Image (cartoon, rainbow, N blue to C red):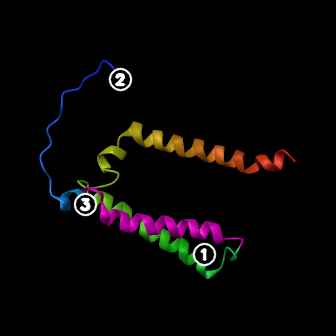
Amino acid sequence: MVFLWNPPPQKHGSVPVLTHIKRLDPIGMLFFLPSIVSLLLALQWGGSTFAWNDRRIIALFVVFAVLICGYAAVQILKPDTATIPPKIITQRSVFFASLFTFFIAGAMLISVSYLPIWCK
């Protein structure tokens, strides 16, 4: 296919730089990135550096929940520039494929985490 397929060239009109930046969903990323960082910090520090019931860990989980809800709201309210457009994730096949992948990855990570204990 690499040697034989010759697709016709597509014509793209010139688009301003601001439009390209809007397509990157900067508002959604302002919610998503800090939410993931706070989740990872809470999971990293919880139980080792701080107790699970420490106010820092609870605050990080609350910040994660608030920001991820804000991210979901931005994705729903601005579907034209959304990172994950609602019309894609509401398709049944895409939703269940994502759910299946989440559970398969979770099962794999559990087995990888306990593998050193089993091999003792």
Looking at the rendered structure, the kind of residue marked 1 is Ile
**Which element is circle 2 on?**
loop
On the image, numbered disc 1 is attached to which residue? 57
Mark toward the viewer: 2 or 3? 2
Image quarter for residue 27?
bottom left
Instruction: Sort mark 2 into few (<14), some (14-19) or many (20+) by Cα contacts within 10 Å.
Output: few
Is there CB contact under 8 Å for labels 3 and 1? no
| Label at residue 21 | 3
Between the C-alphas of marks 2 and 1, the distance is: 52 Å
Residue 41 forms part of the magenta stretch: yes
> Looking at the image, is 108 positioned above or below residue 29?
above
Q: Is residue 70 visible?
A: no
What residue span does the magenta drawing correspond to?
Answer: 21-48
On the image, numbered disc 2 is attached to which residue? 2
Find the residue positioned furthest to the right.
Answer: 120
**Which element is circle 3 on?**
helix
Q: Earlier in the sequence, mark 2 or mark 3?
A: 2
- Given residues 40 and 57, the one toward you in this image is 40
Between the C-alphas of marks 3 and 1, the distance is: 34 Å
Instruction: Sort mark 3 into few (<14), some (14-19) or many (20+) by Cα contacts within 10 Å.
Output: few
Q: Is residue 87 left or right of residue 113?
A: left
Q: Is residue 114 left or right of residue 75?
A: right
Looking at the rendered structure, the kind of residue marked 3 is Ile
> Looking at the image, is 20 positioned above or below residue 90?
below
Residue under the image location 33 percent in, 44 percent down: 88
